[in-house]
Image (cartoon, rainbow, N blue to C red):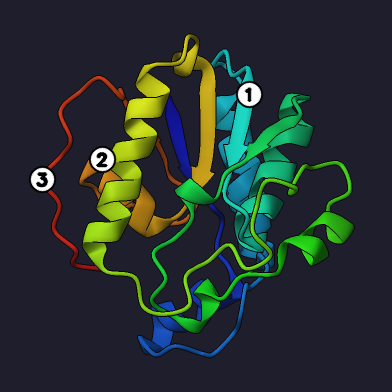
Amino acid sequence: MILLRHGQSEFNAVFSLTRQDPGIPDPRLTETGRAQAAQAARSLAAHKISRIIVSPYTRALQTAAIVAEILDLPVSVVNAEVRERYAFVCDVGTPASQLARAWPGLDFSHLAEQWWPAEDEPTASVEARARKFRAAMAAEPGWQQALVVSHWGFILSMTGESVPNGAIRRCDPHAPHPEISWQH
């Protein structure tokens, strides 16, 4: 499968400069983030992507929408398993009913109204979600053609690699789970 970290968000733009949480719940993409998503889509055009799986955070949904439009593919599944580790205000999500109104072409009916954790999420929890997702993808035919639009912490848990906004990484779900260092 291919993992794509969402484009730069309003949170990322401030946090990268200050290293302080700017207090923006479920931030949107910046113009730089939109450009990163478009560049990622162009890079992915040569791959035979058949479906897009996306986290329910707005920054990931916006990234997936840009990629889907450029690649002329639908966003197939919204999956809260691939969400970010809940550690900052940006990890407060948007309720499922509001997401359904904002994104009428996507199915959010399987999500709880508050699909994100209520408190800081331990790294072991993110790693457990990654292991569960990895096992589910390994059991699916066609996993090689799946694009997963996700986040720094989840991609770190899947690959052992800290990646910047807009980065693309291949991930074989049959490979051993990586050693992870939670340094940002």
Front in this rendered view, residue 71 or 146: 146
Dot 2 lies on which element?
helix
Q: Please report the residue visible at 35 percent of the width from the left and 48 percent of the height from the top.
A: 129
Residue 159, disc: 2
Q: Which residue is mark 1?
A: 51
Mark nearer the N terminus (3 vs 1) = 1
Query: Is there a contact, CB below 8 Å, between mark 1 and mark 2?
Result: no
Front in this rendered view, residue 22 or 95: 95
The reply to whether residue 162 is in sight is: no
Residue 182, disc: none
Please identify the quadrant where the N terminus is shown.
top left
Q: How many C-alpha atoms fall within 10 Å of the one at disc 2: few (<14), some, or many (≥20)? A: many
Q: Is residue 76 above or below residue 184?
A: above
Q: Is residue 40 above or below residue 113?
A: above
Mark nearer the N terminus (2 vs 3) = 2
Dot 1 lies on which element?
strand
Dot 3 lies on which element?
loop
Q: Is residue 158 above or below residue 92?
A: above
In the visual, does 20 lie left or right of 92? Answer: left
Q: Amino acid at mark 2?
A: Thr
Residues under labels 3 and 1: Cα distance? 28 Å
Front in this rendered view, residue 131 or 156: 131
Mark nearer the N terminus (1 vs 2) = 1
Q: How many C-alpha atoms fall within 10 Å of the one at disc 1: few (<14), some, or many (≥20)? A: some
Q: Position of residue 9 (x, y in %)?
A: 58, 68
Q: Please report the residue visible at 65 percent of the width from the left and 49 percent of the height from the top.
A: 63
Q: Amino acid at mark 3?
A: Glu
Residues under labels 1 and 2: Cα distance? 20 Å
Residue 179, disc: 3
Q: Position of residue 15 (x, y in %)?
A: 43, 81
